Image (spheres, coloured by chain):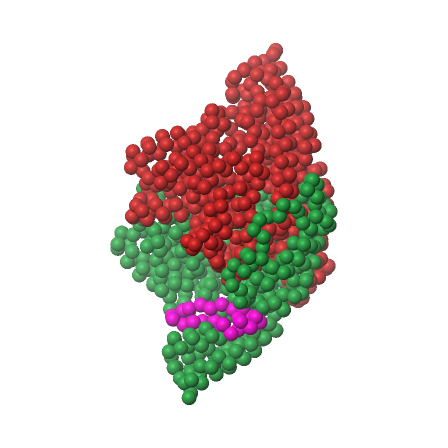
Chain colours: A red, B green
Amino acid sequence: MSSLPLDAPMKPLDPHAIAGDSQAILEFLAEYYRDVDKYPVRAADLEPGRVRKLLPEAAPEHGEPMEHILEDVRRDILPGLTHWQSPRFFAFFPMNASSAGLAGEMLSVGLNVVPFVWAASPAAAELESVVVDWMARLFGLPRRFLFSSGGGGVLQGSTCEAVVCTLAAARDRALGRLGGHEAIARLVVYASDQTHATFQKGARLVGIPPSNFHVIRTSAASGYGLTAEAVRAAVDHDVGLGLVPLYLCATVGTTGLGAVDHVRELGEEALRHGMWMHLDAAYAGSAAICPEFQDYLDGAELADSYLKNVGADDDGAGKAPAAIDYKDWQISMTRRFRAIKLWVILRRYGAAGMRAHIRRHVAAAKWFEQRVAADERFEVVVPRRFSLVCFRLAPRSGLDDDGDDDATNHVNRDLLAAVNASGRAFMTHFVVDGKFVIRLAVGGASTELQHVMEVWDLLQGKAAEVLQHYVKPNGL
Amino acid sequence: MSSLPLDAPMKPLDPHAIAGDSQAILEFLAEYYRDVDKYPVRAADLEPGRVRKLLPEAAPEHGEPMEHILEDVRRDILPGLTHWQSPRFFAFFPMNASSAGLAGEMLSVGLNVVPFVWAASPAAAELESVVVDWMARLFGLPRRFLFSSGGGGVLQGSTCEAVVCTLAAARDRALGRLGGHEAIARLVVYASDQTHATFQKGARLVGIPPSNFHVIRTSAASGYGLTAEAVRAAVDHDVGLGLVPLYLCATVGTTGLGAVDHVRELGEEALRHGMWMHLDAAYAGSAAICPEFQDYLDGAELADSYLKNVGADDDGAGKAPAAIDYKDWQISMTRRFRAIKLWVILRRYGAAGMRAHIRRHVAAAKWFEQRVAADERFEVVVPRRFSLVCFRLAPRSGLDDDGDDDATNHVNRDLLAAVNASGRAFMTHFVVDGKFVIRLAVGGASTELQHVMEVWDLLQGKAAEVLQHYVKPNGL
């Protein structure tokens, strides 16, 4: 595979080129996954702009062999990456890769059809409606969500896209009722203080006045779940001011703490005020393929948007619309053949395989939570529900300043920094009620109990170091 | 590779699983590309719902080998696809796959990092700013668009996402100036009757009243390009009514006809009214890597958004912002590692290879345009600028009803239907000034001059058949 001479025509789909280029990548990835555990999880000590400086200012004039490109990936790119596929990645929420996911994506990109309207690739559009129904069944959702029962859904590219589509639908429904576009200035949307920031971004994008984005406080008493009482108080107050309640975002598994809003209670409250209820289960929704987590979705039939989305064209006969133009169910006109990736994953692993995978991570998180709870230096800040553990060094842990959150926050911040700087784990934090909380988000594709055990050892060692440092000055 | 037993733990990143699953896909794709020319380009004679009926109603309980899954793809999915990678695909605009694109995507999905903020994968964020600068240089854009000169850009997932982001930015800038969210009802956006429908969708999404989406007519006299005079007349009229001009969308290479708006003229007009000008070059922009097409971008520095986008955080010192959080430059919070795909493509083929590829398609379109012009039965409806040819059977072509567009439209509709039904080519149509126009969009990754020659033969044969059918009754 030598550099293409200037005058050689580019043959982008030449079988030899495909075989050669792909093989080079597969070898690279095999090496990467073999070594990923050895890299510092988080790209550390990297001053901004360093990678940029390593790379040329302009594209090359002539083509290069894939091997040259991959040498540069090894030398210039890999050291600057945070390794999301490391088994020691416990930050944000892990984003799973898998052999079936890679295969599905290769199939999607290899076929490279664009099912923006049904006619542009009928099988792609229909496969999407099939896998969306498969997911609804796996989640145990009410039948009305199924295409085969007059419901339906779409695979969005991200949570924010789903929020933007549904907010716009709710907004236009309300404006139609209120008569006159000026009424947009009176529409109010409601979130809890635990709702993901993507909702605020989406509300601003669709033209809801930023001052009409109302955040309702949660507290430890409800496990940081939004309560119907709090929603009612906020809505009643706003209605008294002449505002119009538009949209309530309920969350099953919040990003910061994994908190769960009471879906049925909130759905009934939303109904009372004529509000759209959206159910965001971007994190914890997938856990609901396990029956033991499906209670969290109780009341989902009260949601205006879960899987079901704008543009759903129910033909009224309780059957699936025959030919769906998915471009009308999303922001963009164009779209990838996403359905085949999900289909390959579900076929390759099966429902039982997926459930076992999720349960393995939940069990590992449970193990970790128990260790934290049993160690008097630490405390579990919020009871774990899925595979996210929120904990910290407790105020009582040898510090003289028992109960002072500032000092406790300092020591926890130092602990997290020490763990992340070690390169042997990467975790992120969240602040709730003024408390700096460390998040251990278990869920990496290759994360095993062993890695969680190792991170617990690491934390104990670093905690001892950090506490020693803090206790000494006060102890003198 | 046998079915996973129920109790075998899923090892999603196991090297053997990756090698096995990927290899199966590569063999499938090699076979697919070998055979793609034999399939009917467009999935024909497919009643809606047929593919859906072939597939089970629920996900399988247990995992299956990749070979089983691919057998189902061959049997159930392939016959229902429209083959966008067929060399005989001339519909919409072709969507290129390539060996380097597949490799880049595999690398992106294999590493599976999520560069939503700089710190979440610094090298990924910085690689994006590098390749965006590479593209700006290839397009010959003014230096102010480069990160290295205080500009900057982002790889959006689609045109609509770019439109939504820039519309929201323009809207909020205007509302800030006008003081009061109610003013949103007075904001007007302008498009030509050739602007892509995605703009109308975007404007509606961000809350511009549908009645304030003003479409300005174009005509054959300007090659269906929008003129500054027409914009001025529309804006003056609206300002007289108390409306506020917000945003003008100029297009280089419209979807229907490949028309080009005069960017400099429109930019100066927009400036005069304090409007945001957006430049949509989703189709023809890539041709501007060839210097002979760069004149079409003259005046691009007057655009508020081209590569540059919302959130650009110029530090005022004429240097690139050090650490970019790309989540603030797009709709979604999350994002794929898109930059590495584009980087692999640019490295693998080089600028010279990409230019040659584009010129080969433009030359083939030119060849076709000349044949059409030389055949008295046909006419070129709009002069070709890039690789899209818009033509039809001319009114004079043996029909008694010379000049009657309805009859001419009928015969052209029949011609297109006959060509597409043959399975040997797929083209789409557009209607302009009441004329049904056939579009030959050359640009498929493996489309060669030979395929364009064959489609010309096919068209001539079908035209003879169709004309015979139409002429006969009148000739009796």
Occupied quadrant, residue B367: bottom right
Is any atom of residue A387 visible in this view? yes
Give x and y (percent) for residue A351.
61, 44
Q: Quadrant location of the N terminus of chain A?
A: bottom right
Residue placed farthest to the front in the image? A317
Residue sitting at x 47%, y 46%: A144
Between A467 and B467, the one nearer to me in the picture: B467
Q: Decide: is A193 above or below B216.
A: above
Q: In the image, is residue B419 part of the stretch drawn in magenta?
A: yes
B140 in the magenta segment: no
B146 vs A4, nearest the viewer: A4
> x%, y% of residue B476?
42, 88
**Residue found at the very far top of the displayed protein:** A476
At 49% from the left and 43% from the top, the residue drawn is A142
User: Is residue A439 visible to the viewer in this orientation of the structure?
Assistant: no
In the image, the segment drawn in magenta is B416-438
